[in-house]
Structures are given as structure tokens and as C-alpha cells.
Image (cartoon, rainbow, N blue to C red):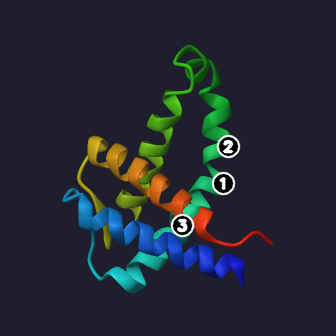
Amino acid sequence: MRLLLVWLLNAVALWLVTQILPGVRITEWWPHALIAVLVLGLVNTLLRPLLVILTLPVTIVTFGLFLLVVNALLFWAVGAILKDFQVDGFWWAMAGALLYSIFSWAFSALLPRR
């Protein structure tokens, strides 16, 4: 039940990002936001750990700031994969990934602990 609630809250977070940033768009927010959040979750679960390990030297040199670039590239990649979720460029992806992370964290903090 909690997983479903987190998924729905992340869809709302993505919708908020599309309302704030003109460079991040979803054609129809409800079904496509749910699909985009699902793909974002899968990409972050499967690819992000590998990319973090591969970019560890750069991440150490930049004191962890390169992880923002990794997040933006994954956000941008999901925008390139899905036709109903569009990200206009790298800087929109950077802003979108940052805002999405903030909203997702805030919504997750509102949920009661198990």
C-alpha cells in the first residue's frame, strides 16, 4: 500500500515540475505521469547505481556535485525514451531532476513511518 501511495505522490511531484518548468512537459498528466514515474523509478533503480560507481572518481573530485549531472542525464534520458514526457534540454533536465527530487522527498517525509 505504501509503495502505491509513494508512486502516486511521485506522479504529483512530476506534475508539479511540469507546471513550474516550461521545458518539462507531459501530454496528459494522469496516465502519462504515472508511466513516466514508473520508468524514472526503474531507471534510477537499475542504471543509477552503475553510473554512480563508474563516475566515482569524478564524483569524489567534485565533492559529490557530479551526482546532480548523473540525475539530470537520467531524467533527460527518460524524456527521450517516452514520447509523452518531454524534456527540452540538459539544463531543463537539471532543473527538473532537482525539483522532482525536492518534491519527492517532501512528499515522502509527509508519509507516516511504518
Q: Residue at x 56, y 20 (%)?
A: 63
Q: Which mark is residue 74?
A: none
How packed is label 2: few (under 14 Cα within 10 Å), some, or many (20 or more)? few
Mark 1 → mark 2, Cα distance in angstroms = 7 Å
| Rendered view: 2 above or below 96 | below
The residue pinned by badge 2 equals: 49
How packed is label 1: few (under 14 Cα within 10 Å), some, or many (20 or more)? few
Mark 3 in CB contact with mark 1 (< 8 angstroms): no
Secondary structure under badge 1?
A: helix
Mark 3 → mark 1, Cα distance in angstroms = 23 Å
| Rendered view: 60 above or below 69 | above
- Quarter residue 49 falls in: top right
Q: Which amino acid does the dot numbered 3 rest on? A: Phe
The residue pinned by badge 3 equals: 107
Quarter of the figure with the N terminus: bottom right
Q: Nearer the viewer, mark 3 or mark 1?
A: 3
The reply, left or right, for residue 21 in relation to residue 10 is: left
Q: Which amino acid does the dot numbered 1 rest on? A: Leu
Who comes first in sequence, dot 3 or dot 1? Answer: 1
The image position of residue 109, as x and y in percent, is 61, 62
